[in-house]
Amino acid sequence: MATKNWIGFPHVVESEQFSREVLEEIFALAALMEKGDFEPFKSPKRMISFFYEPSTRTRASFEIAMDLLGGRVVFSTENAKEFSSVAKGESLADTIRVLCRYKPDVIVLRHHEDQGAAEAAGVSTCPIINAGSGKAEHPTQMMGDLCTIQKRLGSIDGLEIGLMGDLKNSRVVRSLAKALCRFPGVKIHFISPPAFGIGEDVKHRLNNHRVPFTETADLQSVSSKVNALYQTRIQTEREDEPEKLEAFLNGDFHITKDVMSSMRKDAIVMHPLPRVKEITTDVDADPRAVYLKEQIDNCLYVRMAQLHMILAS
Ligand code: NCD
């Protein structure tokens, strides 16, 4: 498969780098990864995974992806703020410069600042993959999410997608909403308390691409319409004004069996995880719930695809 490089290749910083064509190429390569139909790396490839914030799935899936491709994770830290020289006051730029001296082939970075990945890419001598930056972006989660929608529903074009929960603080939703602009006919419903609505910059991008969207605090008004309902966690750790979180108690922002019964028979329910209480556990067994199932698998396959595109060429 011929790799069509994306804007800013080989770094993966933000959703907007990826055209529809490149996204489709990533999904196609992810399908080969799933089937085991790929060539492992022919020469040694070394990954550093450097996470300043907690992670289970993202770090595990990147490290497992590297292993499955025949590469090695040579250095990995799960709490860089505490367990690296960052605790002594080192800047991100200096940390990346130092890590690059050890000649890794790729650095997978999660950082608490919105510009973390961009800043790292600016000084790095090897590819940087953004594994989540502040409240801003989580591009590889977006790829796994879109891949899941495409595989389950056949196409992304023309779908109605509900994006729900703490939209103000969710980097996952921001990356996903921005990427949905690439798919004609998509309509988005943002479902959240008004104080936790999606950012103006995302709305601006949707308007520029003529993507219709609504904003509502009433899940019932859209639950029967959507083809995919994407739930998110309330990001208590990111909220500057925690008292505002009570807004979630005053409305109904949970996905329950009742909500499921109002939804289309062929709709899907997604969540990037970790799930706290925003989807009740009795929904998990519903065949439309994909969050503890293929959504996780697809995030692994797209990460394998990304690493392959960056490192095998
Ligand atoms: C998310 C994240 O870290 O942004 N999780 C993930 O990567 N799958 C969502 C969250 O923390 O709520």
Image (tube, helix red, strand yellow):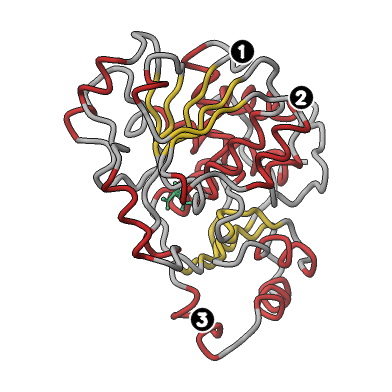
Crowdedness near tag 3: few (<14), some (14–19) or many (≥20) residues, C-alpha within 10 Å: some
Amino acid at circle 1:
Gly
Amino acid at circle 2:
Glu
Q: Which residue is mark 2?
A: 21
Residue mark closest to the camera, 1 vs 2: 1
Dot 3 beta carbon under 8 Å from ligand 1: no
Cα distance between the residues tagged 1 and 2: 17 Å
Residue mark closest to the camera, 2 vs 3: 2
Q: Quadrant of the N terminus?
A: top right
Decide which of tag 1 and tag 3 comes sooner along the chain.
3
Q: Which residue is painted at 29% across and 15% down in the image?
A: 262
Q: Which residue is painted at 76% across and 67% down in the image?
A: 124
Q: Which mark is residue 158?
A: 1
Q: Which residue is mark 3?
A: 84
Q: Secondary structure at mark 2?
A: helix
Amino acid at circle 3:
Ser
From this view, report whether residue 50 is shown above or below residue 58: below
From this view, report whether residue 293 is shown above or below residue 109: above
Q: Nearer the viewer, residue 227 or 117?
A: 227
